[in-house]
Image (cartoon, rainbow, N blue to C red):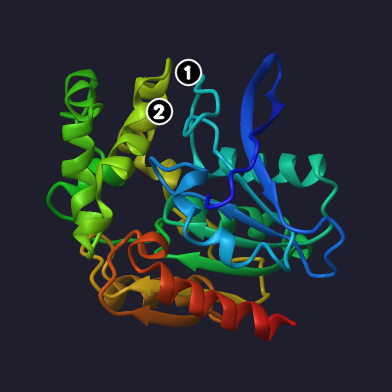
């Protein structure tokens, strides 16, 4: 972040005899009358991936961001990872911070996790802002993006490929297709994404989507219980999840969803085209009052 914020931690007991240490940060005025915002990163990401977004909104809003279990600096146990687990983490965080309602801003897998949380807890969500969400993607992925997103199961993905991927060179090659503005894929970003891959247990979380792709889909939520405001904000140049193919599928799941396509942006839209994304997010938040 532009203004460094101290890391905070909590121990999440997510099952009988199972717990994990979760990292989060909080920003903005404690006494803000506005609904708090919770940012949820995507696959392979961490809360720092929002570092060009949160500072634009933390003057008025109380804001939270956390590393999902298995990613960032959160603990990475050998468990079965899935969207329901991440949604349960959101629920635990809501309880921890005693939040009655929240605006969820999610990217990719994190956005899909937000949809799952909203499905099971519709009264707790004031709005969903979904940046290039995964979970409904049909036959749209190709090339190296399959490895990065882990959305397509493959018997070839295993420890050998993980080792090849889990270094700055592999990360750079995987991040490249997710950005339109290649200047954003600098050494700082590459190292940011590469560091968690060296953590104990990272292989379990990072390979889970490719080993069990059905655990990371949203098809079972149709029809979705959440009927509140939804916005899809998509990068026009997303080759992994092309908006012309995926937006109609999401509008079947969430018929009330409005859609905005931002030019000159790929999958990591919030960071790739942060100014345009922030402008759109500001308009959405202003409309909520």
Is the C terminus in the top left, top right, bottom left or bottom right quadrant?
bottom right
Using the image, determine if residue 62 lies above or below residue 191: below
Camera-nearest residue between 96 and 3: 3
Residue under circle 2?
196
Circle 2 Cα neighbour tier, 10 Å, few/some/many (<14 / 14–19 / ≥20): many
Q: Quadrant of residue 196?
A: top left
Residue at position x 52%, y 58% in the image: 106
Where residue 238 appears, as percent x and y from the top left, is 26, 66
Where residue 285 appears, as percent x and y from the top left, is 65, 77
Helix, strand or loop at mark 2: helix
Q: Residue 78 shows which numbered tag? A: 1
Circle 1 Cα neighbour tier, 10 Å, few/some/many (<14 / 14–19 / ≥20): some
Name the side, left or right, on which 122 lies relative to 159.
right
Where residue 280 appears, as percent x and y from the top left, is 50, 79
Query: Considering only order in the chain, which callout, 1 or 2, is on the residue closer to the N terminus?
Result: 1
Camera-nearest residue between 95 and 216: 95
Residue at position x 47%, y 33% in the image: 71
Name the side, left or right, on which 190 lies relative to 70.
left
Q: Nearer the viewer, mark 2 or mark 1?
A: 2
Residue at position x 71%, y 18% in the image: 16
């Amino acid at each position: 972040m532009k203004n460094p914020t101290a890391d905070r931690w909590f121990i999440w007991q997510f099952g009988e005899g199972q717990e994990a240490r979760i990292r989060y940060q909080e920003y903005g005025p404690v006494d803000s009358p506005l609904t708090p915002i919770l940012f949820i990163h995507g696959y392979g990401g961490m809360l720092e991936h929002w570092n060009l977004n949160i500072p634009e909104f933390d003057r008025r809003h109380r804001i939270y961001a956390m590393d999902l279990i298995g990613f960032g600096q959160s603990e990475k146990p050998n468990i079965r990872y899935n969207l329901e687990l991440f949604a349960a983490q959101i629920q635990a965080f809501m309880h921890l911070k005693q939040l009655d309602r929240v605006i969820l801003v999610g990217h990719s897998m994190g956005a899909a996790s937000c949809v799952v949380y909203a499905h099971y807890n519709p009264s707790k969500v004031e709005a969903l802002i979904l940046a290039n969400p995964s979970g409904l993607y049909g036959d749209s992925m190709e090339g190296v993006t399959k490895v990065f997103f882990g959305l397509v199961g493959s018997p070839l993905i295993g420890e050998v490929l993980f080792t090849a991927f889990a270094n700055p060179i592999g990360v750079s090659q995987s991040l490249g297709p997710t950005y339109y503005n290649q200047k954003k894929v600098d050494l700082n970003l590459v190292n940011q994404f590469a560091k968690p891959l060296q953590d104990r247990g990272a292989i379990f979380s990072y390979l889970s989507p490719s080993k069990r792709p059905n655990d990371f889909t949203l098809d079972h939520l149709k029809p979705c219980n959440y009927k509140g405001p939804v916005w899809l904000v998509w990068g026009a140049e997303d080759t992994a999840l092309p908006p012309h193919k995926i937006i109609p599928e999401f509008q079947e799941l969430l018929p009330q969803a409005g859609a905005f396509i931002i030019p000159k942006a790929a999958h990591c839209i919030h960071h790739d085209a942060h100014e345009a994304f922030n402008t759109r997010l500001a308009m959405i938040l202003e409309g909520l009052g």
